[in-house]
Amino acid sequence: MTRSDLDSFGRPVVVVTGMGILTSLGEGKVENWRRLTAGTSGIRRISRFSITGLRTTIAGTVDFVPVSEMSAPELTTVVAERAADEALADAGIIGDFPGPLFLAMPPVEVEWPQRLALAAASGARDAVTYADLLRTAGSGAFDPWYQRFLFGSVAERLADRYGTQGSPISTSTACASGATAIQLGAEAIRRGETQAALAIGADASVNPESLVRFSLLSALSTRNEPPQAAARPFSRDRDGFVMAEGAGALVLESLAHARARGAEILAVIEGCGEAADSFHRTRSAPDGKPIIACMHHALADASLAPDAVGYVNAHGTGTPENDKMEWLGLSAVFGERAGTLPVSSNKSMIGHTLSAAGTIEAIFTVLSLRHRVLPPTINYDAPDPALPLDCVPNNAREAHVDYAISNSFGFGGQNVCLVIGAAR
């Protein structure tokens, strides 16, 4: 039976026709999937800058990606381009992209090397403000620096490269940003504003200042030896997340548009849900209501009951608080099934890619549906009796799943849940 071009609400069905990915495991879908399902870790000792005095000295860096000048905005742009190039080739789209760009990326900041260089160039001998630095950067020979660090400059560069339509949209919903980009693209297609959308999540912000900030929040793992064993989602001995870099890009289209051009359908974006609690700057509401509501919203948007879901790609950061709250949400939504429903965390291998996590993990979810294999949660050696779930421990598992959920829960209670269906 051929699926209708419209869903049960009379909206265009949104499908995935192209994907590209780059993580600490390597570049491209083939390499990432091979290493992910083998249970390989991309976490390594940081070598890009001095780690002297840092409590955490490991990360899922992408040092194999060359950049002309090291900064988070520049590296974020490059990894986004490489992921998008693969996605567009995968979708068979040549020339200008026939829709808008939705980009998830980290906040743009002037980092310490650039600040010091700008201060030296300005002739300042004492501490100077951001405003002083930017005024200096915006004049004469330093104008390119000024342009690079303006908010929106990364999205503008990508929009120019791919010829996307309209103004590019940059999203920043903390660790849910990548999923938000997909949601915005899907909703634009459903509203009939476009027939296609390019959703990209990219983050390359492993630098000393970011590590210090997260360390001050006691959010990072300090299990530095060996690096590959640090990320331990859902384990009793988990002690925090591991920062990582990467990018994921998805080409989204209406089913009618994809069919008309003969594109291969990789998966269906069945439903999107979001909920925010604003309970605390970093913590989730203790009752878990926003996380529970987020998953319920996504299932209702997909017109599916919880029993239809066969796999959850967990947010699974490995912080004591996040994993506990995700289990609370899963147990409330899935009831008695929560303990037997396969739930795994890719972050155990690639680390937490922050703004990019939602897009990267959505891609891994699509690959799970297509290959009928569930990636493992590695480093699961000490089960937590308070979290009695099936986290696909340590080894990948064959499974035929029709519908899966990809969870993304960000600081400040910014939560997004995607329901993804297998192509059929």
Image: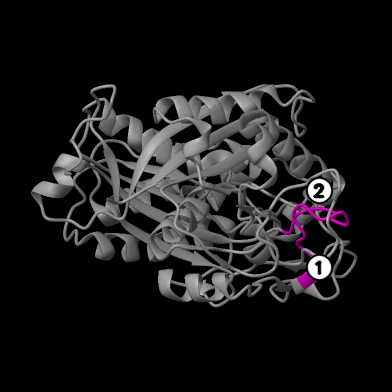
Q: Mark 2 points at which residue?
A: 219
Helix, strand or loop for disc 2: loop
Is 241 inside the magenta-drawn segment?
yes
Identify which residue is drawn at 58% across, 76% down. 38
Quadrant in which residue 377 is drawn: bottom right
Q: Position of residue 403 (x, y in %)?
A: 44, 45
Labels 1, 2: front one? 2
Q: Nearer the viewer, residue 171 or 219?
A: 219
For marks 1 and 2, give the CA distance.
Answer: 14 Å
Q: Position of residue 232 (x, y in %)?
A: 77, 60
Identify which residue is drawn at 79% across, 65% down. 230
Display coloring: one colour
Does 353 appear above or below 44? above
Give the residues drawn in magenta, as a range: 229-242
Q: Nearer the viewer, residue 264 or 214?
A: 264
Q: Name the residue under label 1.
A: 57
Q: Position of residue 311 (x, y in %)?
A: 54, 49
Q: The disc labelled 2 sits on which kind of residue?
A: Ala
Does 156 appear above or below 414? below
Q: Is the magenta stretch mostly helix, strand or loop?
A: loop
Helix, strand or loop for disc 1: loop
Q: Earlier in the sequence, mark 1 or mark 2?
A: 1
Left or right of 163 in this view: 153: right
Left or right of 216 in this view: 150: left
Identify which residue is drawn at 28% across, 25% down. 8
Q: Nearer the viewer, residue 70 or 120?
A: 70
* Residue 236 visible in the shown view: yes
